[in-house]
Image: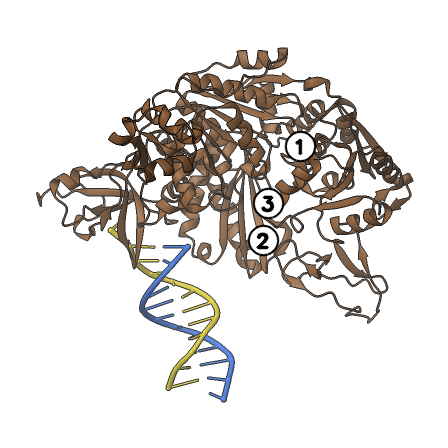
Chain colours: A brown, B blue, C yellow
Amino acid sequence: MNCDHPTVLTLALPTPLFRHFEYLAPADYTPAQNDALIPGIRVEVPFGRQTLVGILISKSHTASYPIEKLKPAYQALDAKPVIHGDILALCQFAAEYYQHPLGEVMMAALPQKLRASDGALPQTAYWQLTTEGKGLNSENFKRSPKQQTAWEVLLHSAPLAETALTAKQVDKSALKQLQKKNLAETFLADAQALPASQQVLNETPRTLNNEQQHALDTIRFHKFGCYLLEGITGSGKTEVYLQAIARVLQAGQQALVLVPEIGLTPQTVARFEERFAVPITQLHSNVAKGARLENWHSAFSGQARIVIGTRLAVFAPLPELGIIIVDEEHDLSFKQQEGLRYSARDLAIVRAKKNNIPLLLGSATPSLESLHNALQQRYHHLRLTQRAANAATPALQLLDMRKQPQHAGIAQASMDAISATLERGEQALVFINRRGFAPSLICQSCGWSAACKYCDARMTLHNSPRKLHCHHCGAMAYPPSQCPSCMNPALSALGQGTERAEETLQAAFNQHTVIRVDQDSMQRKNAMAELTQQLLEGQPCLLVGTQMLAKGHHFPNVTLVVIVDTDQGLLSGDFRGIERMGQQVIQVAGRAGRAEKPGTVIIQSYRPDHPLLTQLITEGYHNFAKSILGERASCRMPPYNHMALLRAESKRADNAKALLTKAAQIARQLQPPSPECSYLGPIPAFMERRNDRFRYQLQLQFSHRQTRTQLLQQLVEALNKEALSKRVRWSIDVDPQDMG
DNA sequence: AGAAGCTCTGCT
DNA sequence: GCAGAGCTTCTT
């Protein structure tokens, strides 16, 4: 080793400090080992009193830090980079755009197992026939067809990994049998991408209608472009995805499909597996850690040709990526709500651009951001307006609640419609976006109400088991038997939740099955899958549930949908409340009448003359959304400007407020308020105290993204120098989706 | 962030 | 006199 020119490693470490750290190469490393330190590998280093795993950014012989103060790294953890190419660029973009330290972003892009020093890139087990196995002929397998298939596949190919074998319909246990008989064997090796498979399809694609064909024909492959596929429920968006993916696979490329958190049902994956003869892998938080590393690695090595996953999959390494699809692109779950607050949809756009490939955004109810881009012709706007297989569009009926006798929030007219539906032997669905029995417990004689000790919120009454529950912090309490304030023994449960609706409906339709679907009733792992199966059998029944019913699941036998509390969105303090309400109504409505039976949707409202609500019902989502865009344009709200939220919370209210006041002052100095740039705050969050902390926010709005990025960068730097910033929990939310 | 070291409380 | 909370400092 040349002591005049030691090897200096620049690392990105997972710390909240916005800078790189320099180390010497491990003291005992030979020149050959030093050469193997290549950017993108993980390196284990001492950091203060801790040991951390970082990513090697660059290697040189000079340091910006006094070289005699550099500590030697402990060891390199990889022989080849785990982060490189487009993922590195994506991480760098995200770090800058969302104001997050690069080391933390990179760690977020890696599967958890690789964030620790004991995790390593797995090697893949390859199968091949033994000499003995090669000497046999098909006669030897007369009585075991599965083993014969396995043997034939192995005989006619180079050694194959298990994922590739599964895609070729080879049975795993048959392989084990061959191994037992010493006819086949495995060996470990670095995974190799498969040669472009000739066979991509398992089944014949469906015939596309004109609109679908036009959409598919518009997509230009091997070139960057955003395509907004706006298609009503049942118009066959999935078939367009499948055929676009087929093109990409035939060109020897990989596909990435992002779906909302709860939308990733086993049915979705099964649909892809039915169509394609290539290895498909899944990446989402329900995949166990070990399996997630395996799945990540099969994408990394190029073995998996399709990756289906939730927002975290936007960072999945795909060396031959040819298309990205974001299904239900309006869905909130694409935005991470803590830590690195990224939007997987927006990062997908960045990634598609860097990779020069097409990006398909699909939704029946596109976000205003995407719709705006489409209308501005930054995106290709592809619309699917016809339902497949002659299925009728559900009829939307607005029900004026002011003139209705009602039972626990459900109008008599709704009850009659449910009754008629069940009589016809069909299924009905009642949508209430509140779990529990009632959202509050109050004393009607003195006005006391059961409030949460830790939040500015009332506790929700649950009946089975009987408890008061705070939905904001998780606190639990037993309902008092009398009013703690005036000793009145009769307390009233006010308002409607799913439990109460279930009780009321079960009493009214006691000869039918009523099933409640919410977080509480669907705790078991396969509960939803079992329910879907049960519903497919078509017995008449009544479903009562929350959001959970609105996403991803298809209930072909449901012909009536009742939406109980439509008005919540109209009253919400969030400027996106109305947009959400519209999306929710249309999404819930989409559950009805998917088959040949026409569906009806009853929308209960106390504001039936609200112009946007009536427009939604008479003209549909597209025009409704355009109207909201008009309002956003006139008051310069997103997508017509670019927002960031600086949130702060602390046990002592004045600390959080003072930090934001300071931040506002710094911001004004850096970038004086103007039509291009404005600051609002500090203002209290919608719920000022939550989980025993006081919460405030500073709203920052900009005409140009670039101005925002620059200002935020300087603001974060300045805030980190403030002593107060260490006593207050604060974070920056770029493009916030939830203003709470 | 996370660990360690320092200082200021509030007691028995 | 001292445990423990709360605050500061440091990390290459």
Between the C-alphas of marks 2 and 1, the distance is 39 Å
Q: Which residue is mark 1?
A: A554
Quarter of the figure with residue A291: top left
Q: Amino acid at mark 1?
A: His
The N terminus of chain A - image quarter:
top left
- Label 1 neighbourhood size at 10 Å, few (<14), some (14-19), many (20+)? some
Residue drawn at x 64%, y 58% is A455
For residue A471, what is the image quadrant?
bottom right
**Residue drawn where x is 30% and y is 26% of the image:** A136
Q: Which residue is mark 2?
A: A695
Report x, y in % for residue A251: 41, 16
User: Which residue is label 3 attached to?
Assistant: A526
Quarter of the image where one finds residue A709: top left
Instruction: Tell me the crowding category of disc 2: few under 14, some 14 to 19, or many 20 or more residues within 10 angstroms, Cα based.
Output: many
Would residue A324 appear left or right of A131 to someone viewing this image? right
Q: Which of marks 1 and 2 precedes in the sequence?
A: 1
Question: Disc 3 on helix, strand or loop?
Answer: loop
Residue A334 position within the rendered picture, expressed as x and y whole percent measured from the top left: 54, 36
